[in-house]
Image (cartoon, rainbow, N blue to C red):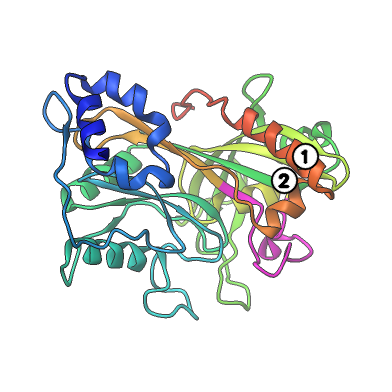
Amino acid sequence: MASRLVSRFVRGQNQSRLAERCIPLFTSDYFHLCRRLDMWSNARCRVLPQIRGVCTTPPEPLRILFEDNHLLVVSKPAGLSSQPGDKGDNRGSNSLDLAKKYLCEKRKKDTAYVGLVHRLDRNVSGVLVFAKTSKAAARLSQSFRDRRTQKLYIAAVNCKDLFEVENRLLQGGGVRVDSKCILLHHNVDPASSPKPSRTQCFDVVPEGQGVYRGSLQSAKLLVSPLAVCSSSSIAYLKLELLTGRKHQIRAQLAYCGLPISGDCLYGHPGPLSSDRALGLHAYSIAFPHPTTKEWVRFSVELPRTLSWKLLLGKSSEESTRTLEKLEELMNDIPHHLNEI
C-alpha cells in the first residue's frame, strides 16, 4: 500500500518541487519510507524497489536523520565518541563503528565503507555526517577544508543577563559585527601542555598578541546571545563555527569568562548530571551535496536529556517555555559569514 502511495506521489514530480514537499518526512520516524526515495537520480525521482530480508534497524543509540546513496546523517547523543580511539571505549561503542555495523547488516556484507568527514566531542550532542563512498568523502572533506559549510551550535553558559554576556565577549577580544552578533578571533595553540587527565586542554592567544609560534591556529567563532533563564542563571548562545579547531568553542568561550555549563576541563565547577553531557549541541549543518552540488541542510532538536532539562529551567513548565523560545530563535538561520 505504501509503495503505491509513494509511487503515485512521486510520479511526474521534479526534484526541487519534491524536495520542498518532502522536508517534513526527513526524520527518523519516517526513515523507512524516505530511504526508498532516491532524490538525486537523473532529472526525476524514482521509487527504489523494496529489498526483502535486509536489516534496517537504526544503529542505537544513533538516530538516523537522512540517508541516500552518498550520505548518512545521524543525531549523536552526548557520551558517545565520534570515532575509535578514546580510552575506555569498547570495540563498536563509537559512532563510526555503529554506522559501519548498520550498513553491513543492511547490505548483508562483512565490510562497508564509512567516511568520517567531521567530528563532535564525546560529551557534545548533535548532527554528525558520514560519507558512504570514498568519492563522497573526498568531496565533503574538500568542502570542509574550503570552509564551504555552515555549522551551527547552541551553548548554555552561566550568566545572569545578556548584557553581561556581551560585555565578557567584548572584553575577551570580540568584535561586534552587527546588533546581534559578536565575532571572536583568537589563536588556538594545539601544542599546549595537556592536563593530568587524558583529555588535552588548549590555550587561547588573542589575535595580534603574544609571540608567534608555528603551532598557533587561527580560530573564528560568531556568537549571538539568544536568551536567559532567570531561575537557573543560564544564558543561551547561538554559535556559528567559522573554523574547525579542536575544542575551539569550549576554549574560546572559557577565555572570555563564559565556560560551557558542565565543562570541567575549561573551568566550569562540575558536571551537570551523571551523563556528564556538556551544555553544547550541534543543531544544524549545511554543505554542498557531494554529487548534486546543491546546498543541503540537516538539523536536530535539542536533546531531552537530564542535563538539558536542568539547563532549561527548574520547573517542567519553565523548561517547556524556555525550550519553545529557544527552538523559535534557533530556526532563524543566519547568513553564511565565512568571508569574515
Q: Position of residue 54 (x, y in %)?
A: 21, 61
Q: Residue at x 66, y 52 (%)?
A: 279
Disc on res. 72: none
Res 39 seen here: no
Q: Quadrant of residue 230?
A: top right
Compared across the picture, whether 160 is left or right of 98 comes to right
Highlighted range, magenta = 259-281
Q: Is residue 71 above or below residue 292?
A: below
Residue picked out by circle 2: 256
- Pick whichever, 114 or 336, lies toward us: 114
Residue 126 part of the magenta-drawn span: no
Quarter of the picture containing the N terminus is top left
SS category of the residue bearing label 1: helix
Question: In which quarter of the view is residue 318 placed?
Answer: top right
Task: Please state which of residues 289 and 15 is positioned toward the viewer in this rendering.
Answer: 15
Q: Is residue 316 above or below residue 78?
A: above
Asked whether residue 76 is in view, the answer is yes
Q: Which residue is mark 1?
A: 168
Is 277 inside the magenta-drawn segment? yes
Q: How far, Cα to Cα, is label 2 from label 1? A: 6 Å
Answer with mark 2 or mark 1, whichever residue precedes in sequence.
1
Classify 185 as above or below 106.
above
